[in-house]
Amino acid sequence: MRKIRVAFFADMLIENFDGAARTIYQIIQRIDRSRFEYFFITGSAPGPDFQYKYYLVPSIDIPKNEDYKMAIPALAFFEMNNAMLIFKPDVIHISSPSFLGRYALDYGRNNQIPVITIYHTHFISYIDYYFKDAKFLIDAVKAFVISRNKSFYNGCNLVLVPSQSLMDELVGYDFDDSKMKLWPRGMNVSLFSPEKKNNNLKIDYGLDRPIVLFASRLVWEKNLTTLVSIYEKNEGLGRPYLFVVAGDGVAREELQQLMPNALFLGKLDHEALSIWYASADVFLFTSETETYGNVVVEAMASGLPVVVANAGGPNDLVDQYVTGIKCDPRDADAFYAGINLYMTDKQLRSTIVKNALQYARSLDWDQLTASYFEMVAGMQSQKT
């Protein structure tokens, strides 16, 4: 039986770089090579252990966020076309509506090849942050971004969206709901588990108070200003909790200056992060721009109670006072009250941890990726 050929376009193909990359690699790790042949087109070279063919597109750094690379297909247009002609894909997968993604969408349309995409990043939610110093531009820019994204996603054959609230928002922007399908993110419950708790962690690090853990890529659009406000409130009350920050990014240096008594761990691999999740006392997550919120579910699966922003993906992940606590994204007092509640109400804490564990364990990557591959296989028949 002939294999189904999939051309997979992703500006970033670095494992564990962010939530989108982690989702992509969950798919990559489960490719059935007896059924599928994947060819990756990317602006960032994957690691040396990458087992699949890939084409490296010239790329540039993104202003204000140098961690990211943006592929520029115009710099290798004819070479890319030749690579695609040689590969002859049956299906095209696109990870984002970037220049590379739009090249792939145009190629699919021009050659009658069906296109699938996963809605990884809700760029619309970033506009308020990036234009906070030019608020008079926000409405116009937002309208432009919505229009551009709508034309991109409506041009795809299938759009996998991680949460119902996000899907509802997109439908409100007149995205084509007939092309959208709910596809949440999964969880590796053997990696993230309460069993990873290290009772000696506080001793090893010389810590003498409860740990409030924040894990994220450190960029200001993750609402780090509210994180700083919560930290400052803790400082003003005599520092009853120790703030621990896991992650790296362009905002790290400035954030460390603003939070001098916090412990910054830098970027951790999953094994190290799983130990911190299971060993901390509360997970704090202030971001209001999450499409899903992988770190929230990772904390839940680790038995760590969560206090999150009542916005974006975490809003769907957390059932208020059932699987966690949700707060207004800008209300530092509410976040701090949530942290205190876990510390003082042991019964509520125990109930929420139990419910959150049950929810996290219901999310299985094997089942989710199996459904993805069946959708890809089904799309092959759409090729004309």
Image: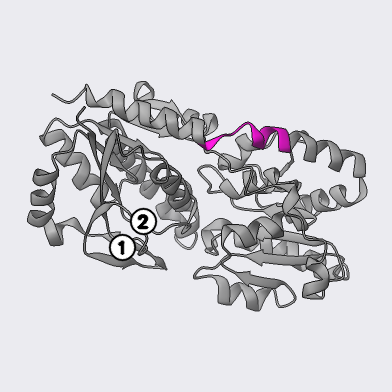
Q: Is residue 175 visible?
A: no
Dot 1: element? loop
Residue 173: percent from the left, percent from the top? Answer: 40, 32
Number of dots carrying numbers: 2
Let me know if residue 208 is in the magenta part: no
Q: Residue 45, labelled with which disc? A: 1
Q: Residue 182, labelled with which disc? A: none
Q: Residue at x 56, y 62 (%)?
A: 269
Q: Residue at x 49, y 70 (%)?
A: 250
137 and 61: which is toward the camera = 61
SS majority, magenta: helix
Quadrant for residue 196, please give it.
Answer: bottom right
Do residues under tags 1 and 2 come within 8 Å of each other at their CB atoms?
yes
Residue 278: percent from the left, percent from the top? Answer: 74, 53
Q: Quadrant of the N terminus?
A: top left
105 and 141: which is toward the camera = 105
In this picture, residue 162 sits left or right of residue 90:
right
367 and 160: which is toward the camera = 367
What residue is disc 2 on?
13
